[in-house]
Image (cartoon, rainbow, N blue to C red):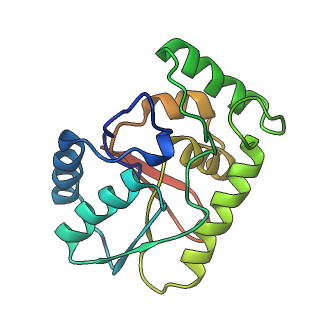
């Protein structure tokens, strides 16, 4: 799952943003439309917008929430507001040059490996369906590697919030829902 709509604060790094009121409402509405399968836990990035999305989903599904180190977004620790065009150009570069530090504080390859390890630890520790609430860029890096999708086009199609369904252990992309 990608987190819901944040309350964007120009003077606060994105990793510290919380959900907006609309974001809480959208997460709750999405939870009502989705079936959590056999999941009993919603695993979440430690970032507030992800935790708050996870709590909204878990409340609708009567699940617990567990924060997991490693599920955070591609590291961008500095509060920096870019135009939409400039931000998308940086994201495009990040996907195009995954081994280079082109944006933020980690390479795309490092973010993908970190995220993949965190997801696979959650999968290995559960006999149930696994739900992860995280962020668009790291989700895209994971899905692109596993399913062979073109990352920038996939990333641009992700809504706030949305779900990406993948089969395990094959890691095949089953679908995207919002």
The C terminus - image quarter: top left
Residue at 79% across / 30% down in the picture? 97
Residue at 42% across / 82% down in the picture? 128
Residue at 51% across / 64% down in the picture? 167
> Within the image, what quadrant is residue 26 found in?
top left
Residue 7 location (% of width, % of height):
31, 37
Q: From the viewer's perspective, tell me whether residue 62 is left or right of residue 151.
A: left
Q: From the viewer's perspective, tell me whether residue 83 is left or right of residue 96.
A: left
Residue 169 location (% of width, % of height):
60, 71
Q: From the viewer's perspective, tell me whether residue 11 is left or right of residue 168.
A: left
Residue 6 location (% of width, % of height):
33, 40
The N terminus - image quarter: bottom left
Q: From the viewer's perspective, tell me whether residue 151 is left or right of residue 25.
A: right
Residue 129 location (% of width, % of height):
42, 75
176 over 57 or under it: above or below:
above
125 over 104 or under it: above or below:
below
Q: Residue furthest right?
A: 99
Give whichever of 147, 132 is nearer the camera.
132
Give whichever of 78, 62 is nearer the camera.
78
31 over 129 or under it: above or below:
above
């Amino acid at each position: 799952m990608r987190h819901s709509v944040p309350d964007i604060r120009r003077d606060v790094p994105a990793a510290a943003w919380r959900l907006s009121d609309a974001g809480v409402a959208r997460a709750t509405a999405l939870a009502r439309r989705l079936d959590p399968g056999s999941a009993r836990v919603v695993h979440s990035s430690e970032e507030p917008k992800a935790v708050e999305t996870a709590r909204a989903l878990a409340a609708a599904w009567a699940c617990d929430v567990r924060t997991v180190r490693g599920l955070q977004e591609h590291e961008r620790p500095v509060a920096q507001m870019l135009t939409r065009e400039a931000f998308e150009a940086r994201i495009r570069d990040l996907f195009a040059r995954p081994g280079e530090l082109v944006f933020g504080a980690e390479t795309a390859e490092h973010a993908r490996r970190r995220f993949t390890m965190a997801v696979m630890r959650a999968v290995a520790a559960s006999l149930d369906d696994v739900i992860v609430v995280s962020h668009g860029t790291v989700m895209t890096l994971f899905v692109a590697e596993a399913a062979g999708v073109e990352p920038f086009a996939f990333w641009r199609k992700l809504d706030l919030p949305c779900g990406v369904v993948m089969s395990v252990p094959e890691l095949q992309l089953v679908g995207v829902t919002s």
